Amino acid sequence: AQKITQTQPGMFVQEKEAVTLDCTYDTSDQSYGLFWYKQPSSGEMIFLIYQGSYDEQNATEGRYSLNFQKARKSANLVISASQLGDSAMYFCAMREDILTGGGNKLTFGTGTQLKVEL
Amino acid sequence: NAGVTQTPKFQVLKTGQSMTLQCAQDMNHEYMSWYRQDPGMGLRLIHYSVGAGITDQGEVPNGYNVSRSTTEDFPLRLLSAAPSQTSVYFCASSYHEGANYEQYFGPGTRLTVT
């Protein structure tokens, strides 16, 4: 069974600084995908970044990058130059079994609440 | 494009009542799914569908039914509401299974069962 662990229930960061949100995962699949989603207080789920298990380069999307360490089974999200609008809940999620057609099912972690301060 | 739409936004039910949460997408996505979000537990998969006429159970399917008669619509039915089903429900869609596409989420339905 898959599992996603986010050990930081809450984080604080100063505006303009970088912050790392931790995510570790557990799977026996060889082929899988890792996602990060942002959920602001308004409640919607916003896709941020994706990393495939066979991707050799770490994914980047603007100020977001994913620090993927396959041997350690970690997929940490790095937000550079934090902004007040980054204050939100952040979820790490994993999609199982890409190559054998397991559907696009996501397993989510419990989330990290990030607060950006002036 | 409206993306993924969900109705209603809010709903209060009494224990034992039934209702249907509506979900529609206009992106021609084959894959659709329902999640529930409870405090401290992240999102959990209820049911999913890989195409019209095909549905399957997720992690927490008990008490819910789904059907997929068209590509666009994927309603979630609560057969006999219980207080344990108080939650926020999200519908999501994406391109076909087997691809590394992001899932697009609807705005959510906040359901309270008294």
Image (tube, coloured by chain):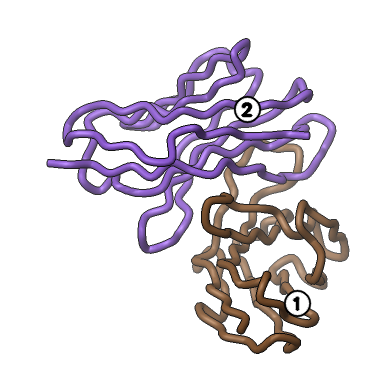
Chain colours: A purple, B brown
Q: Quadrant of residue A100?
A: top right
Front residue of this view, candidates A72 and B30: A72
Q: Residues within 10 Å of mark 1 (few under 14, many from 20)?
A: some
Instruction: Please give the label number shown on residue A25.
Output: 2
Q: Position of residue A77 (x, y in %)?
A: 43, 29
Residue sitting farthest toward the left: A118
Question: Can you tell which quarter of the image residue A26 is in?
Answer: top right
Q: Is residue A36 left or right of residue B47?
A: left
Q: Is residue B57 above or below residue A79?
A: below
Q: Residues within 10 Å of mark 2 (few under 14, many from 20)?
A: many
Query: At which x and y percent is residue A39?
Result: 43, 52
Q: Toward the viewer: A44 or A62?
A: A44
Residue ID at (73%, 26%): A27
- Real-space Cα separation, disc 1 to disc 2, in angstroms: 32 Å
Do the CB atoms of the residues marked 1 and 2 lie less than 8 Å apart?
Answer: no
Task: Find disc 1 in the rendering and name its residue.
Answer: B77
Q: Which one is nearer the viewer's eye here, B25 or B36?
A: B36
The chain letter for the residue carrying disc 2 is A
| Marks 1, 2: nearer the viewer | 2
Q: Is residue A54 above or below residue B6?
A: above
**Amino acid under disc 1:** Arg
Q: Chain of mark 1?
A: B
Quadrant location of the N terminus of chain A in the rendered image:
top right
> Given the image, on which type of amino acid does mark 2 rest?
Tyr
Element assignment for label 1: strand
Q: Residue at x 59, y 49 (%)?
A: B103
Please name the residue shown 75% across and 77% down the image.
Answer: B77
Q: Please report the residue visible at 66 percent of the width from the left and 44 percent of the height from the top.
A: A106
Q: Position of residue B9 (x, y in %)?
A: 51, 78
Asked if residue B61 is positioned above or below residue B96 in the image, the reply reads below
